[in-house]
Image: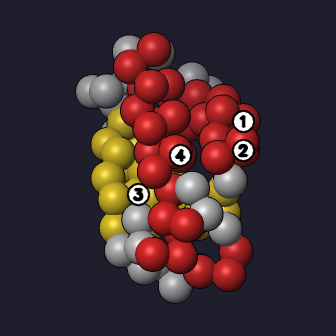
Amino acid sequence: MIKITVCIGSSCHLKGSREIVNSLEEFLITHNLKDEVELSGSFCMDHCMEGVCVKLNNQIFSLTPRDTEKFFNDEILRRLYK
């Protein structure tokens, strides 16, 4: 199982974490992956200056809402279907 954790702390919230969570939820439903990917939120992950902090398993990414689809395709789908 892949685990995605999105920071929902105040800094990341202001940078669009809610939009990112909503997009990831939509992509998981569209691709029927709710049973293969665990999506959760977390407060500050200590990368506030870099954008919305998203942890994929143990790797940290910094996203904006417009990067979310590319992140999903390049990182999540690639790991599930390699």
Q: Residue 16 sits in which quadrant? A: bottom right
* Marks 1 and 2, how far apart at CA: 6 Å
Q: Horizontally, is 61 left or right of 29 in the view?
A: right
* Marks 2 and 4, how far apart at CA: 9 Å
Q: Which residue is mark 4?
A: 20
* Marks 2 and 3, how far apart at CA: 16 Å
User: What residue is at 70 percent from the left and 74 percent from the top?
Assistant: 50
Point out the frontmost of discs 3 and 4.
4
* Marks 1 and 3, how far apart at CA: 17 Å
- Label 3: how many residues lie within 10 Å, few (<14), some (14-19) or many (20+)? many
Q: Which residue is mark 3?
A: 5
Mark 4 or mark 2, which is nearer the start of the sequence?
Answer: 4
Q: Name the quadrant of the N terminus.
A: top left
Q: Residue 71 sits in which quadrant? A: top right
Which mark is on residue 67?
2
Q: Residue 15 sits in which quadrant? A: bottom right
Point out the frontmost of discs 1 and 2.
2
Residue furthest toward the front? 14
Answer yes or no: do the residues labelled 2 and 4 have beta carbons within 8 Å?
A: no
Of helix, strand and loop, which one carries label 4? helix
Which mark is on residue 70?
1
Amino acid at circle 2: Asp
Nearest the eye: 19 or 80: 19
Mark 1 or mark 4, which is nearer the start of the sequence?
Answer: 4
- Label 1: how many residues lie within 10 Å, few (<14), some (14-19) or many (20+)? few
Residue 80 placement (x, y as % from top left): 51, 29
